[in-house]
Amino acid sequence: MALISIFRVQDASSTFRNYLKEITDEINNKSNDYILNVNKSEFKQYIENKYDFTPLTVYSEQATVKFIGKRKIKKEQHGTEYESETYRFELSVPYVGSYFLFFLSPSTRLMHHPNVNVPSLDSGNLTAEFELYEQNEQQFEYNKNDLLKGITGNVTNINNDLQKFKAEIVSTFENTFERKKEKVLSENSFFEKLNIHINKKTDTIFKVPIASKRIIPEPIVDKKTTKKYTETPAMDDAFYSDIIEVIYTFFKSVEKKPSIFKNKDEEGLRDYVLPTLEIRYDNSTVTGETFNKNGKTDILIKYKDGTNLFVAECKYWKGEGILHDTINQLFDRYLTWRDSKVSIIFFVSNKEFSKVLKTMQESIPKHEYFVRENGSNGESSFSYIFHFPTDKEKFIYAEIMAFHFPE
């Protein structure tokens, strides 16, 4: 995490110009054969993916403030020096988007650049401190809102610059590629007129490199089911594991931040993880409180064609009874036959967290839909296989997680 004067470390215009020069150089440095034989559309898509930065979204309405301590300072009044105490606070604001954009100074900007801690991730929480010199509620609100204004004030400006840059990527590619191709064709024509042999390997296949992105693939056939005649759209196991890891890691982090989970209900806690899931995967939409079958699911990830990929339900732990009730609610009311990857997330306020985990592990195999255990993904994240309520040959992969948010 870096403490920076936000939106002023380096110039956005020059940064984006340097990226455009990189694109130009990459195209011009390709061999003549490559330019003549490569699939232009694929090459263009590769370039766009390589520089596909995500615009910033700062969730100021979810900002939290916590008291972090006092500080003694020396003051002077009427020639007399004395000590006074100040009150120090930390503002925390969730965000998603390419974090490096916080380092850039937009072409049009507000001249308000507070010092902010920015994590080296494309989602998380920005943190910044402010200080109060007296017990004054109005001054507290003013300082907090002024800091929020400094954090959010240039978000739209830098996103506008980013959109212009993305448009320039397309025009830069088109112009550079066509100029390079025309030059190659012109040279080939010249040498042919001189009766100088040109090596024409038109059957050469040039593979376009793949820019690394988190992409949900096309739904695959679920081969776990014993019904060979069915083709069930399902999420790839690797992406299911990634979603489970993201949720588990996210809420483990929240466990360390009482200012986030204190006095929050299931919906309030769920809303904190949605932005992280929204930006992590291409070709998908992530929603909360969405109708599916006969009820509303807490978290629903859909493929771009509308296929359900992942369903999750969030609950506060209220004893062993809530466990079976939640499984019944999820499986009987929310799941369709084509839903195969699910999770139940419990928020536990009990002091004896280990006792709750033991109760969960002992109780789950007693459920009527239970098939078998399927390993674990952490101290409080357990994998199971259940069957669909009306079809014992249709398997449902369920991750049951618990997180400790003591009162």
Image (cartoon, rainbow, N blue to C red):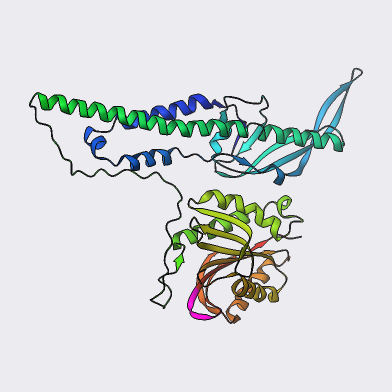
Q: Position of residue 319 (x, y in %)?
A: 71, 73
The answer to whether residue 394 is magenta is: yes
Q: Position of residue 240 (x, y in %)?
A: 49, 61
State the image quarter where residue 368 is shown.
Answer: bottom right
Quarter of the figure with the C terminus: bottom right
Position of 78 with respect to 159 (left or right) is right
Q: Residue furthest left?
A: 195
**What number of labels is visible?**
0
Q: Position of residue 17 (x, y in %)?
A: 45, 26
Using the image, determine if residue 176 lies above or below residue 397.
above
**Residue 235 or residue 232, whichever sits in front:** 232
**Residue 356 or residue 158, whichever sits in front:** 158
Quarter of the figure with the N terminus: top right
User: Is residue 359 at least partly visible in the picture?
Assistant: no
x 52%, y 50%: residue: 280
Position of 320 with respect to 389 (left or right) is right
- The segment highlighted magenta reads 389-395
Judged by its main secondary structure, the magenta piece is: strand
Q: Position of residue 350 (x, y in %)?
A: 73, 66
The answer to whether residue 225 is magenta is: no
Q: Residue furthest right?
A: 78
Position of 243 with respect to 47 (left or right) is right
x 54%, y 54%: residue: 285
x 67%, y 75%: residue: 325
Using the image, determine if residue 104 lies above or below residue 325.
above
State the image quarter where residue 158 is shown.
Answer: top right
